[in-house]
Amino acid sequence: MKEFIKRFGVLVIGILCMSAGVALSKLSLLGTSPISSIPNVISNITAIPIGQLTIVFIFILVLLEALVLRRQFSWQNLLQLIPGSLFGWFIDAFVKVFHNLPNQTYIEQLGLVLMGTVLLSLGVFLEVNSHAIIMPGEGLPNAIALIHQLKFAKVKVYNDFILIGISLVLALGFTHSLAGVREGTLIAAFLTGRLVNFFTEHANRFVDWMTPVAGD
């Protein structure tokens, strides 16, 4: 029971960090991380809150995962909907909490992007090391890598580029601008993995503490 509480406690903290990071990036007006870029662009087009759209997007990702895995898809994969839905709900909550933060100048906007990217990276680090439930953003690339016997990291990179590409098409097609997918998206794509590696290298005791022991 203690192990369960530890793992899911860390997962929830990770989701909170990721949600806060996406909210800050959203408010920067410079674009969000690749996984949130499509909901962000559609939010700009429709005025529907980004968190609500993120939850819909999460369901689509899990559906695509089911199509990829087919018979290998199980109820355990469906559990991804729980942290995914929390992620979307918390994003909207943090957007409301942070909505008064200054974002009028480019320096202020860039500051929000950088803070958001650090928080997002910390959240990913905590999520991965919780060894609880994988998030749908990693679940689909992981499924593709498993079925086609590819390296997860390589599939994840291609997946991010595809998400950014779809976001660009939506933004240009409906707004004739890059609103929702700008330099902030590229900054997040470039820095997130590096920051996760940084946290991993400098938090060895935490990583060891969270690593499952054989027989657990």
Image: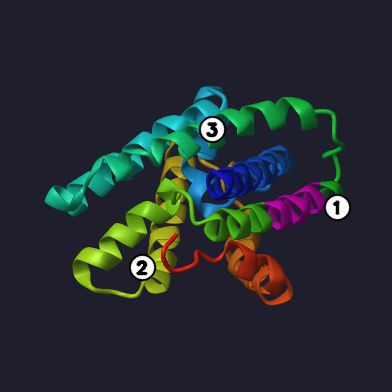
Name the amino acid, label 2. Val
The answer to whether residue 85 is seen in the rendering is yes
Few, some or many residues within 10 Å of mark 1 (<14, 14–19, 20+): few
Q: Is residue 84 left or right of residue 2?
A: left
Q: Label 3, secondary structure: give it.
A: helix
Up-down relation of residue 46 to residue 87 (above or below)? above
Q: CA distance from mark 3 to mark 1?
A: 31 Å
Residue hosting label 1? 107
Q: Residue at x 47, y 54 (%)?
A: 164
Up-down relation of residue 191 to residue 119 (above or below)? below
Q: Residue at x 69, y 41 (%)?
A: 20
Name the amino acid, label 3. Leu
**Which secondary structure is most common in the magenta stretch?**
helix
Q: Nearer the viewer, mark 3 or mark 2?
A: 3
In this figure, what is the number of numbered marks?
3
Tell me which segment is drawn in magenta: 109-119
Q: Is residue 61 left or right of residue 206?
A: left
Q: Mark on residue 155?
A: 2
Q: Earlier in the sequence, mark 3 or mark 1?
A: 3
Q: Mark on residue 86?
A: 3
